[in-house]
Image (spheres, rainbow, N blue to C red):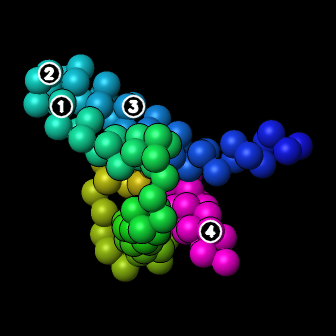
Amino acid sequence: MNTISKYAKFIPYLYFLSVITYWFTDINKSEGLSAYPILLFCIPFLWQLIKPNRELNFSLGIVFVCLSSYMVLAYLFNVLNIINWSESAQRFLFYGGALVLGNFVMSLWIIRNSIKKLF
């Protein structure tokens, strides 16, 4: 049990690294060389795994909570029919639901880890 709690703090970073890697491979298949700047998004998460920084950790958490909250609002607007979405946008919202929920949970986990380190 001690080993699990020791490595549990790395789960959000590994999640975001896997999402970025999937995003890179998906774009790389269709667009080739122009997908390589996507890998720059991996740098802060790799840095947190190698040499953790409290300020960077908190900043990453806040940024991704804001981005995830924006997508959660898009889901609410879709459910309440406030905005008329096209068929392809609705399909994207449906399939991206797990990703948005995962991003939101992992971002909150990063913030929780930051706050735990402060106290």
> What secondary structure is marked by label 3?
helix
Amino acid type assigned to the residue bearing label 3 in the image: Tyr
In the rendered view, does 99 fall on the left or right side of 38? right
Residue positioned 48% across, 65% down in the render:
54
Magenta range: 100-119
Q: Nearer the viewer, mark 4 or mark 1?
A: 4
* Residue 11 drawn above or below residue 105: above
Front residue of 15 and 113: 113
Q: Quadrant of residue 17?
A: top left
* Circle on res. 22: 3
Residue named by callout 4: 117
Front residue of 40 and 76: 40
Q: Are marks 3 and 4 in contact (CB under 8 Å)?
A: no
> What secondary structure is marked by label 1?
helix
Residue named by callout 2: 32
Amino acid type assigned to the residue bearing label 4 in the image: Lys
Residue named by callout 1: 35
Residue 37 on image: x %, y %: 17, 37
Sequence order check, earlier mark of 2 and 3: 3
Amino acid type assigned to the residue bearing label 2 in the image: Gly
Query: How many neighbours does mark 4 have within 10 angstroms: few (below 14), some (14-19), or many (20 or more)?
Result: few
* Residue 21 drawn above or below residue 95: above
Q: Quadrant of residue 60?
A: bottom left
Q: Are marks 1 and 2 in contact (CB under 8 Å)?
A: yes
Q: CA distance from mark 4 to mark 1?
A: 35 Å
Front residue of 29 and 12: 12
